[in-house]
Image (spheres, rainbow, N blue to C red):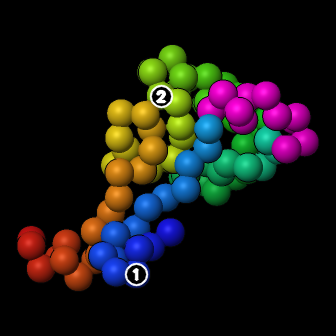
Amino acid sequence: MTNFVSGVTHHICIDIQGALKRSDKWLDGILQDAETGRELSPKEVRHLLRKQQEKGLSFFSGCNNMDSTGRCAGHPPEEESSAQA
């Protein structure tokens, strides 16, 4: 989601504890392998989310700029990023 005033983009996130309570049908294909694009099985999703929980995270965003809970901390607009480089 992009804030149209600041231009900062935030990824959505999943509440890990809530997702682990969901059915396999709900979890089936909710996440994809970042390299191959293959949809993860419910078993793989549960494994990944439990690993994140073990790291102390409450949320999973799949992003490279997370806060201490696992939520996306935001990404500045591309124009600002390249202008600062």
Looking at the picture, how far across and down is residue 58, in whole percent? 52, 30
Q: Is residue 59 left or right of residue 17?
A: left
Q: Amino acid at mark 2?
A: Leu
Where's the C terminus, which quadrant?
bottom left
Q: Is residue 22 above or below residue 26?
A: above
Residue 64 makes an appearance in the image: no
Q: Mark 2 vs mark 1: which is more N-terminal?
A: 1
**Residue 35 magenta:** no
User: In the visual, does 56 lie left or right of 28?
Assistant: left
Secondary structure found at label 1 = loop
Which picture quadrant has residue 7?
A: bottom left
Task: Examine the rendered structure and indicate whether residue 72 appears above or below residue 21.
Answer: below
Rendered location of residue 4, percent (x, y)? 40, 81
Near-viewer residue (48 or 35): 48
- Left or right of 29, for residue 25: right
For numbered disc 2, what is the local secondary structure?
loop
Residue 21 location, x and y as percent?
A: 79, 28
Which mark, by number, is residue 57? 2
Extent of the magenta region: 16-26
| Amino acid identity at mark 1 | Phe
- Give the foreground label among 2 and 1: 1
Q: Rounded to the nearest whole Å, what is the CA distance between mark 2 and mark 1? A: 28 Å
* Residue 4 disc label: 1
Estimate how packed mark 1 is, as few (under 14), some (14 to 19) or many (20 or more) residues with alpha carbons within 10 Å: few
What secondary structure is the magenta-colored segment mainly? helix
